[in-house]
Amino acid sequence: MEINYLSIITLIINLVLLFLIIIVIFKEIQSVKHFIKRNKEMDKKLDIIMKRLENKEDN
């Protein structure tokens, strides 16, 4: 039984590439989640500032 080393090497390279692609997708999803969370926090802070400014204008 003859083993084709080129096909084994190709398989290993493909598996490594697939693993790296999955890692990149996972990291990108995490960064998008972080961005959304940070954006929501900034919105809350801006709302607080706007309310304070409106209260000062009323007084």
Image (cartoon, grey):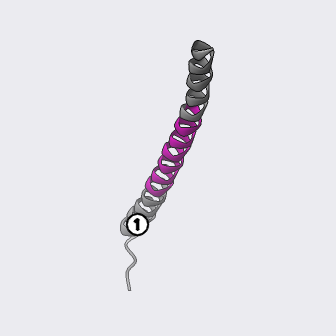
Q: Nearer the viewer, residue 51 or 11?
A: 51
Q: Is residue 29 above or below residue 7?
A: above
Q: Measuring from the top left, give residue 1's x and y in whole percent.
A: 38, 86
Q: Residue at x 43, y 53 (%)?
A: 21
Q: Is residue 35 above or below residue 8?
A: above
Magenta residues span 21-42
The reply, left or right, for residue 11 in relation to residue 52 is left
Instruction: Please give the residue where the numbered disc 1 appears in the rendered image.
Output: 11
Residue type at the position of mark 1 = Leu
The magenta stretch spans residue 10: no
The magenta stretch spans residue 31: yes
Secondary structure beneath disc 1? Answer: helix
Q: Measuring from the top left, give residue 12's x and y in whole percent.
A: 45, 64
Tell me the crowding category of disc 1: few under 14, some 14 to 19, or many 20 or more residues within 10 angstroms, Cα based.
few
Image quadrant where residue 42 sits: top right
Image quadrant where residue 2 sits: bottom left
Q: If the image is split into quadrants, where does the C terminus sit?
A: top right
Q: Nearer the viewer, residue 50 or 26?
A: 50
Q: Residue at x 61, y 20 (%)?
A: 55
Q: Measuring from the top left, give residue 46's x and y in whole percent.
A: 56, 27
Q: Residue at x 38, y 62 (%)?
A: 10
Count up the numbered dots: 1
Q: Nearer the viewer, residue 36 or 42?
A: 42
Q: Residue at x 48, y 46 (%)?
A: 28
Tell me the chief SS of the magenta region. helix
